Image: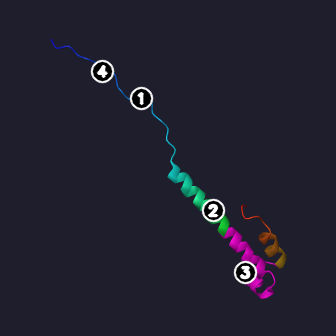
């Protein structure tokens, strides 16, 4: 009768590897969002002096300035 040999698996412990591509992608997306907010709020601040344009978008001067004064990270 043949003998069976059992070999132990030679796999070491599984190593956790970070997925840097995902982190970079999320960081870039957040950066682009903050930059877009900054540009939009700057444009809104410039619009605050024209009542006709503000009525077109349906906000008051106070609302426009309040939104424009928010920090870009919020």
For the residues labelled 1 and 2, the Cα–Cα distance comes to 39 Å
The label nearer to you, 2 versus 3, is 2
N-terminal-most mark, 4 or 3: 4
Name the residue beneath numbered marker 3: 57
Does 3 sit left or right of 21 as displayed?
left
Point 72% across, 80% down: residue: 57
The quadrant of the rendering that contains the N terminus is top left
Q: Element at badge 4?
A: loop
- The extreme bottom residue here reads 52
Which labelled disc corresponds to residue 31?
2
User: Which residue occupies the extreme right position in the image?
Assistant: 62
Q: Are marks 4 and 2 in contact (CB under 8 Å)?
A: no
The residue carrying mark 4 is: 7
Q: Comparing marks 1 and 3, which lies closer to the viewer?
A: 1
Q: CA distance from mark 4 to mark 1?
A: 14 Å
Q: Earlier in the sequence, mark 1 or mark 2?
A: 1
Q: Quadrant location of residue 46?
A: bottom right
Q: Nearer the viewer, mark 4 or mark 3?
A: 4
Q: Is residue 18 left or right of residue 36?
A: left
Q: Secondary structure at mark 2?
A: helix
> Which residues are drawn in magenta?
36-60
Circle 3: element type: helix
Of callouts 1 and 3, the N-terminal one: 1
Which residue is tagged 1? Answer: 12
Question: Which is more N-terminal, label 2 or label 4?
Answer: 4
């Amino acid at each position: 009768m043949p003998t069976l040999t059992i070999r132990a698996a030679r796999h070491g412990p599984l190593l956790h590897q970070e997925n840097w591509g995902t982190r970079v992608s999320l960081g870039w997306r957040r950066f682009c969002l903050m930059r877009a907010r900054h540009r939009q709020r700057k444009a809104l601040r410039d619009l605050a002096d024209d009542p006709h344009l503000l009525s077109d978008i349906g906000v008051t001067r106070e609302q426009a300035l309040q939104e424009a004064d928010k920090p870009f990270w919020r």
